[in-house]
Image (cartoon, rainbow, N blue to C red):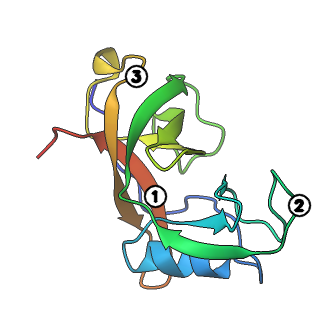
Amino acid sequence: MLLPQRNAGIPHGAPTSVSHAFWEGCRKGQLLFQRCTCGTANFPPTEHCRQCLGKGLTWERSKGLGTLDTWTVVYRPVVQAFTVPYAPAIVRLDEDFSIMSNVVGCDTEALTAEMRLRVVFNHLDSEFSLPYFQPESWP
């Protein structure tokens, strides 16, 4: 069964002073993450590096490519906005950070560990977009 994108009524986090750049990047179709001067990629956004606790964090643009670490296929929606099936997943990006998202654009039976994925943006409205992932080879 195909995993489509959803638009209306999708719950999402609100931008904060720490995460504003991430959400603005998503709105522009860019997946942003923080990198510390020690070299560690930080995600989700934070005020301090998770490795060295330093404050030398800058924003970088991810290439948006990664692998499927783990996922589940949901057939009972938590809220009505989620039409089943949907596939929440943890994706490990090539820049060495993980993000929890949804996989779209493929059949549920096609999902496999280490599957190569690329980011696509689900534009909920003119102000808000969510990063989703689809198979890298998808058109």
Residue density around tag 2, few if under 14, some if 14–19, many if 20 or more, within 10 Å: few
Rounded to the nearest angstrom, the CA distance separating label 3 from label 2 is 30 Å
Describe residue 133's horizontal placement relative to residue 100 as left or right: left
Element under disc 1: strand
Query: Within the image, what quadrant is residue 36 found in?
Result: bottom right
Q: Which residue is mark 2?
A: 53
Task: Tell which circle, 3 or 2, labels the residue nearer the N-terminal end.
Answer: 2
| 2 in relation to 133, above or below | above
Q: Residue at x 67, y 54 (%)?
A: 40
Sequence-wise, the earlier of marks 1 and 2 is 2
The answer, for residue 74, to whether it is visible in the render is no
Say what secondary structure mark 2 lies in: loop
Q: Amino acid at mark 3?
A: Glu
Q: Secondary structure at mark 3?
A: loop
Q: Kindly identify the amino acid type of the residue bearing the numbered disc 1.
A: Pro
Q: Which residue is mark 1?
A: 131
Q: Which residue is mark 3?
A: 114
User: In the rendered image of this protein, does residue 39 appear above or below residue 107?
Assistant: below
Percent position of residue 10, x then y: 55, 58
Q: Identify whether 54 is placed above or below 76.
A: below
Q: Please identify the quarter of the rendering in which residue 52 is found.
A: bottom right
